[in-house]
Image (tube, rainbow, N blue to C red):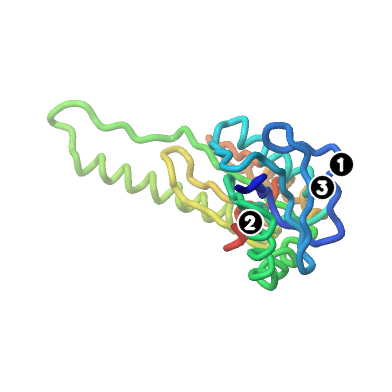
Amino acid sequence: MFETCLYVYGIVPAGRLEVDGVQGLDDVPAEGIAVDGLEAVVTRHPPATRFDATEEALVRHDAVCTAVMRLVPVAPARFGTAFRDEESLRGELANRAGELKRILERLEGRVELGVRVFTSATVERPEGAESSGTAFLEKRLAERQTAVGLATAVDDRLARLAVARTSSVLETPGVPLSASYLVGRESVEEFRAAVAALDGEHAHVTLICTGPWPPYSFVDGAE
């Protein structure tokens, strides 16, 4: 019978972790387990503990990653990542040490910033039997082309200030662009200023910048 299971919040370079006072799920103090130049940020829980993705649990997971990120690069783990004992966790870290070290090198000194572009412009279907369905579709196409053009222009401007980005165009109606950018800490304020400038340049559009966050979107296969 296993005496504990280990819930993982993320991976950091060994020897640089400070988690004094940091509490994870169920208010359990966080700690580090080091293997081959890496350190896993974990909390210990009773065996067979279920980690349900409640809002409270997701917030606490992010809070631990954010607290760690302030001092050291972190490759955040996917919510719910857990190991049945230290041996299995150490084995996984040893097997993936090279990959995880490369990811952490890429994340050194960098954070994630999120940007969403909102617009209230919509095309309503004409009323009446005499209304042209073709005209409606043409307006919808024009709306989409405008949104794509806006998203591309915004993304191109912001990408110049980022090391990497992930973006989605028109993922939902009224949101031409939803994107994440990997930005050097020294460039965060410049990036925010660029978002504010773009917001002022485009009428009927709102740009929202969030973060800095742990770089969830840029850990590749580190989950």
Q: Earlier in the sequence, mark 2 or mark 3?
A: 3
Q: CA distance from mark 1 to mark 3?
A: 13 Å
- Pointer 3 local density, CA inside 10 Å: few below 14, some 14–19, many at least 20: some
Q: Is residue 220 above or below residue 10?
A: below
Q: Is residue 24 above or below residue 188?
A: above
Q: Is residue 58 left or right of residue 193?
A: left
Of the pair 93 and 189, the residue shown nearer to us = 93
Q: Quadrant of residue 67?
A: top right
Which residue type does callout 3 highlight? Arg
Say which mark, if any, is on residue 20.
1
Helix, strand or loop at mark 1? loop
Of the pair 92 and 199, the residue shown nearer to us = 92
In the picture of the structure, the residue carrying the numbered disc 3 is 70
The answer, for residue 212, to whether it is visible in the render is no
Say which mark, if any, is on residue 157.
2
Q: Quadrant of residue 73?
A: bottom right
